[in-house]
Amino acid sequence: MNGDTLYSIGELARRTDLTVKTIRFYSDRGIVAPTDRSPAGYRLYSIDAVARLDLVRTLRELGLDLSTIRKVVDRELSLPEVAAAHAEALTVQIRLLCLRRAVLTVVAERGSTPEETELMHRMARLSENERRRLIGDFLDAVFGGLDAAPAFAGVMRSMTPDLADHPKTEQVMAWVELAEMSLDPGFRAVVRRMVEDQAAEEARNEVTVPRRDIAAAVRDQAGPALAAGIDPASPQADPIVAAFTAYYAHLLGRPDDVELRRRLTTRLESVNDPRWERYLQLLAVVNGWPAPESLAPVVDWSVQALRARTGQ
């Protein structure tokens, strides 16, 4: 081909590997207009049509619509601007596809009902602002009236999920389950009770930073005993129990007696609610944090030790 020669649709099709029907379609829509016509009325195209058709094919393969393509090849729109807008749109589509895949994966694994599937789909499609409102409502229910205490500011931050703009499938799955949990009135009541118990322990705290909570104190004291295989009902456990009950008595400003130890038993059973541990696990996945240490074994040991000494 040379710059002065005109070519038929058939010759253009052979050059571009497009079908005659496709080239005619683009021509009819003004995307690749003929340069002239033969005496018999057939369309004829210049060599520029080859480059134009190559660009059209590339843009179509990238998913651009014909109206936008026509404006690009006619230089009515800047190709870099169009590409940036299209890439942003594809990013949104990819995110939605990831969300759908995550929901379908959960449905398949759980054997979910249509109602559960609809709820999960709605949770997955929430915008960032909607997600913040949902979690804000959960935190208000848990910390309402207590959130002004400086010691709880960090606690609230540590309980707040932050789903990434481009989350992995497992993060979306974790978010969906976490969102469902945050709407559960029973779970809200469990966490509210934990926060109120901690507030009571913090009430005597004259500084503005949280003390080591009782679960952490129990872990530090009872963890080595559990690892060593000490029976929680044995005399060997006495000094370990005395250490963490003394710490709890100090937190509350009360004597270390049977009543306090029974109260501590109830407190630890609340902390040991499996739903709370599940929330922390899901939170770590959503936020990309390391998996949290499970306190369940050491708390179980401590509860058994307390019950053995309080006659419960």
Image (cartoon, helix red, strand yellow):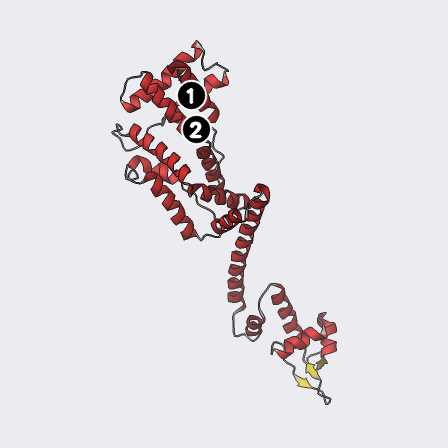
Whole-percent x and y of residue 132?
Answer: 40, 48
Could you say which is closer to the camera, residue 158 or residue 267?
267
Q: Distance from label 2 to label 1 (Cα)?
A: 10 Å
Mark 1 or mark 2, which is nearer the start of the sequence?
2
Residue under label 2: 272
Residue type (three-letter) at the residue carrying disc 1: Val
Q: Is residue 39 above or below residue 219?
A: below
Whole-percent x and y of residue 268?
Answer: 40, 25
Q: Residue at x 47, y 26 (%)?
A: 296
The disc at residue 303 is 1
Query: Which secondary structure, mark 1?
Result: helix
Q: Residue at x 42, y 23 (%)?
A: 219
- Which residue, as the protein is rendered here, is positioned at the far bottom? 39
Relative side of 117 to 185, left or right:
right
Whole-percent x and y of residue 107?
Answer: 57, 45
Q: Residue at x 42, y 41 (%)?
A: 184
Residues under numbered marks 2 and 1 in contact, where contact means CB atoms less than 8 Å apart: yes
Q: Is residue 5 above or below residue 264?
A: below
Dot 2, how many residues are within 10 Å of its Cα: few (below 14), some (14-19), or many (20+)?
A: many
- Which residue, as the protein is rendered here, is positioned at the far top? 235
The image quadrant where one finds the C terminus is: top left
Could you say which is closer to the camera, residue 88 or residue 216?
216
The disc at residue 93 is none
Quarter location, residue 264? top left
Decide if residue 1 is in sight here. no
